[in-house]
Image (cartoon, rainbow, N blue to C red):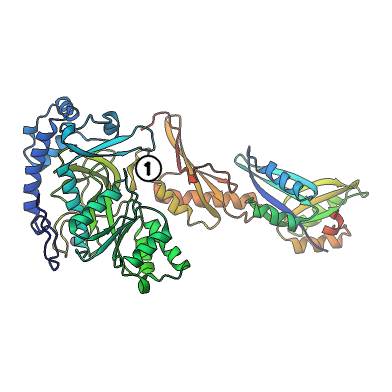
Amino acid sequence: MNNIIPNDNCPFFNEKMETMTRAEIEALQLERLQATVRHCMNSPFYKKRFQEAGITPEDIKSLDDIRRIPFTTKQDLRDTYPFGMASVPLRECTRLHSSSGTTGTPTVILHTRKDLEEWAAQVARNLWMVGLRPDDVFQNSSGYGMFTGGLGFQYGAERLGMLTVPAAAGNSLRQIKFITDFGTTALHAVPSYVTRLYEVMRSIDVDPRRDTKLKVLAIGAEPHSEEQRRRIEEMMGVKAYNSFGMSEMCGPGVGFECQEQNGLHFWEDYYIVEIVNPETLEPVPDGEIGELVLTTLCREAMPLLRYRTRDLTRVLGRSCPCGRNHVRIDRMRGRSDDMMVLRGVNIFPIQIEKILMNFSELASNYLITLTTDKENDNMLVEVELEELFTDDFHRLQDLTKRIQRALKDEILLTPVVKLLPKGTLPVSDGKAVRVVDKRTVYQ
Amino acid sequence: MTTIKQLSIFIENKSGTLIKVLNLLSDAKIQIIASTIADTQDYGIYRVLCSAPREAFTILKENGINVQLTDVLAIAIEDEPGKAATAINALSDAGVNILYMYSFLWQGKGVLVMRTDKSDEAMQVIARKSIILLDEDNFKN
Ligand SMILES: [Zn+2]
């Protein structure tokens, strides 16, 4: 393993890999894909998968042949829990990360020593890309332990050679004391926690611009909008870069924004990135939103082929003024699990929400219920009234009709709209339930 | 001559809103003088005349109830048969539409409550016909 650190004035951490042309990237990807597929035959899971699909590693002759390989899903990880997907003997593994999962069965991701080194190298590449150097002080306010945002950034920042402050999550006053006492220049945190830290700073009269040396924030692990990022940058007086990580791939490091802040570079020497239509599973053209599918190219312990991430995004481009030709991926738009397919139309709750928020008469809580009636799918949209603005049924019915029309313009279907008194919709664990699917044939 | 304040409360059919409203008013020692529920298939509006409408409005709103204070006309229809019909005919002739109405007995006397689309004109018509318009003081505890 190459542990060299470049000169501070070099813009690239791994110049050779980061500045490859598209042709070079694709040639390397094919070579690594073929090797990965061959290596996967050590995993009982993939060996069986390939047999069932009637393919052998020798069938992968071009990058397009990846489409002959079946997808891997989260369910596969659950079904093979804990070690059924390993492609190496356990004695070669040095760490596992496990996610409990909200639905019950946990999943496990295994790492060899080399996997951990490669993971650290990816994170280091990202942090170098946004201008961090060994002189910087990196504070990580992620939870450590099983959550990959802790150890992932820890080893990456150490690999780059920064002084690291493994502050871990919580205790805002202590975080702020570390930032001021140790001269922290870079902080990794989830976006909502940055906002929280800022509030606490203000309450104790710490001005991030005046009293800290912060210059870079790495934010991720939580979906956030461009507006939220700009607010964070404005509050803290620093640049905030979007980080994409996924424990199934390793953790943080998979994709990161460069200083152009125009999409996240996904490292194509480590992954093959596909964007597919979540229904047909066919590839979608660049620029079109679909589900992100990732194939690992360098992992030893547990390579994953065509893993369906359920994250929805799109390709923004394959070149960049920063000099890197690794694909640029848009910030995540939502989860394909949230998508509803109604009479052949793809609908996301966010589309409904956007329309409802345009009506000042309505409160922010709503519930979409899908039902089947005489083999037809129907949608019921229940929404709470913010203010009772009239006691005239005609005006209430008129409001219902206006909502219905606006929804139809957006989703091309006419839902049933029902107004509800405030506070009557179900709320679970403080989080609103948005979609209930009661259709007899669940897709 | 004046209109009086009625509470209009948005309720879901089969929901607990109605019981919540009744408990809140009862806890605040507010007396319900008359009430009526009008509903459609999906929701209803519970209309209430009470001893302290503004206080009730504040309490209900603070407790997250969709409530509005609505101006309605209340006329006395005791002792004089045909007065109600006269009033309604006169309003209709003056081009005033009645959006809804309900009646009840208050201290042994008949009261007719109505919401019109033009309350000023309605009040003038009622005055010309010598019909007694009740104000909120009539319903104080
Ligand atoms: Zn770039």
- Residue A179 location (% of width, % of height): 34, 64
- Residue A199 location (% of width, % of height): 45, 64
- Image quarter where ligand 1 lies: bottom left
Is residue A141 toward the left or the right of residue B36 in the image?
Answer: left
Is residue B47 toward the left or the right of residue A200 in the image?
Answer: right
Residue A228 appears in the rendering: yes
Q: Say which quarter of the image contains residue A126.
A: bottom left
- Image: A353 above or below A80: below
Chain letter for mark 1: A
- Image: A351 above or below A278: below
Q: Nearer the viewer, residue A83 or A113?
A: A113
Which secondary structure, mark 1? Answer: helix
Residue A317 appears in the rendering: no
Q: Residues within 10 Å of mark 1 (few under 14, many from 20)?
A: some
Mark 1 sits on what residue? A338
Q: Nearer the viewer, residue B103 or A364?
A: A364
- The residue positioned 57% from the left and 54% from the top of the image is A386
